[in-house]
Image (spheres, rainbow, N blue to C red):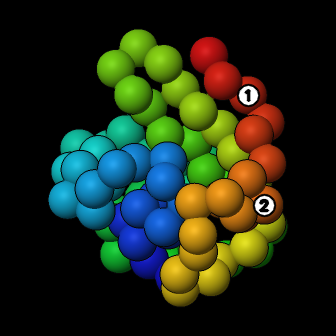
Amino acid sequence: MRLDKYLKVSRIVKRRTVANEAADNGRCEVNGKVAKPSAQVKVGDVVEVAFGNRKLKFKILETPEHVKKENVEYLYEVISCD
């Protein structure tokens, strides 16, 4: 699954265009490397997203195409939130 789509589906970012801009501006990393919006993510990847002066680092547990908002907590595990 594409990084920008995963951020939208998991509701880490509200809109896919915002996720796209974040990745384009170098604020997203997958497994320690700066990632583009089209970067493919899979189960087990560690993703870090910068929101202003905060950073969210999480591990991907599932990559479904669609998910209800009640079930988003099962999609990723937060490693750190600075």
Q: Residues within 10 Å of mark 2 (few under 14, many from 20)?
A: few
**Does the rendering let one see residue 51?**
yes
Task: Report x, y in % for residue 27.
Answer: 37, 39
Q: Is residue 33 above or below residue 78?
A: below
Residue 3 visible in the displayed image: no
Q: Is residue 57 above or below residue 43?
A: above
**Left or right of 24 on screen, residue 82:** right
State the SS at label 1. strand
Badge 1: how crowded within 10 Å, few (<14), some, or many (20+)? Answer: few
Q: CA distance from mark 1 to mark 2?
A: 16 Å
In the visual, does 20 lie left or right of 29?
left
- Please provide percent x and percent y for residue 31: 65, 55
Q: Earlier in the sequence, mark 1 or mark 2?
A: 2
Front one among 78 and 36:
78
Q: Position of 5 compared to 71: left or right? A: left
Mark linked to residue 74: 2
Q: Residue at x 61, y 51 (%)?
A: 47
| Residue 77 x, y percent position in the rendering | 79, 48
Quarter of the figure with residue 10: bottom right
Give the total of numbered labels: 2
Q: Which mark is residue 33?
A: none
Tell me the residue at 66%/58% (across/down): 70
Q: Can you identify the residue that label 1 sits on?
A: 80
Q: Which numbered mark, 1 or 2, is in the foreground of this view?
A: 2
Image position of 15 with respect to 28: above or below: below
